[in-house]
Image: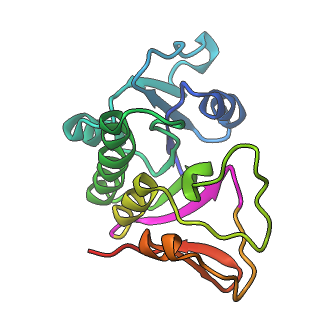
Amino acid sequence: MMHRVLITGAGGGIGRSLRETLRGVYPVLRVSDRVPLAPARPEDQGREEVDKTDIADMAAVEQMVAGVDGIVHLGGISGENSWEKILEGNIVGLYNVFEAARRAGVKRIVMATSNHAVGFYPRSQRSTTGSCRAPTAATASRRRSRKRSPAFTPTSTASVFCAPGSAISRQSRSTAGVCRSGSARATTRS
């Protein structure tokens, strides 16, 4: 059994909910975000650790993951933003969390992805099982940084399925969108 579990991005909507849900499930729950979090409740003293860490800072991330057995990684920018903020929070931050976890010997990471796994749909267009589009450039870059990680379970807030043999547009191929075996997968060219 895991003794200490870390939730990054604990100040976001999913993170706040998960903090409540996992309270008491593990002997120690460490919650972290770059924004201030509510302090541990008096009855949770010694069972909940509240941390403020910017995941773009590797030294701080190494301290944040020290002594944890598992990580639920929710930290990062969940919507559209400037390239600099996406780079810092979602690409550098993701790399830092996974690399610090690897260095610290963390055995499990659960990571939530977003609807940015597949892009180029206008909000008004509904995707179908026959649709397969390319991942956004930022998503493809994040996927590349997950190559040397501890065992992890990706989860998604937006499931994407493509029918086997679906036609892939020239634009999708050029931006590394691939549709195989009924699921969307991304590859990148170096």
Q: Is residue 50 left or right of residue 122?
A: left
Location of residue 104 with respect to 76 vertically, above or below = below
Location of residue 140 with respect to 174 vertically, above or below = above
Residue 114 in sight = no
Of all residues, the one furthest to the front in this rendering is 170
Residue at left offset 34%, top offset 54%: 101
Q: How is the image coloured?
A: rainbow
Residue at left offset 42%, top offset 73%: 174
- Asked if the magenta segment contains residue 186, the reply would be no
| Percent position of residue 137, x then y | 41, 56
Total marks drawn? 0
Q: Is residue 157 left or right of residue 47?
A: right
- Nearest to the observer: residue 63 or residue 114: 114
| Percent position of residue 32, x then y | 45, 29
**Quarter of the view holding residue 89:** top left
Q: Quadrant of the C terminus?
A: bottom left
Location of residue 149 with respect to 58 vertically, above or below = below
Magenta range is 148-159
- Asked if the magenta segment contains residue 158, the reply would be yes
Residue at left offset 69%, top offset 53%: 158
Residue at left offset 26%, top offset 42%: 62
- Nearest to the observer: residue 3 or residue 78: 78
| Percent position of residue 50, x then y | 46, 23
Q: Quadrant of the N terminus?
A: bottom right
| Percent position of residue 148, x then y | 33, 69
Q: Is residue 8 left or right of residue 14?
A: left
Residue 67 in sight = yes
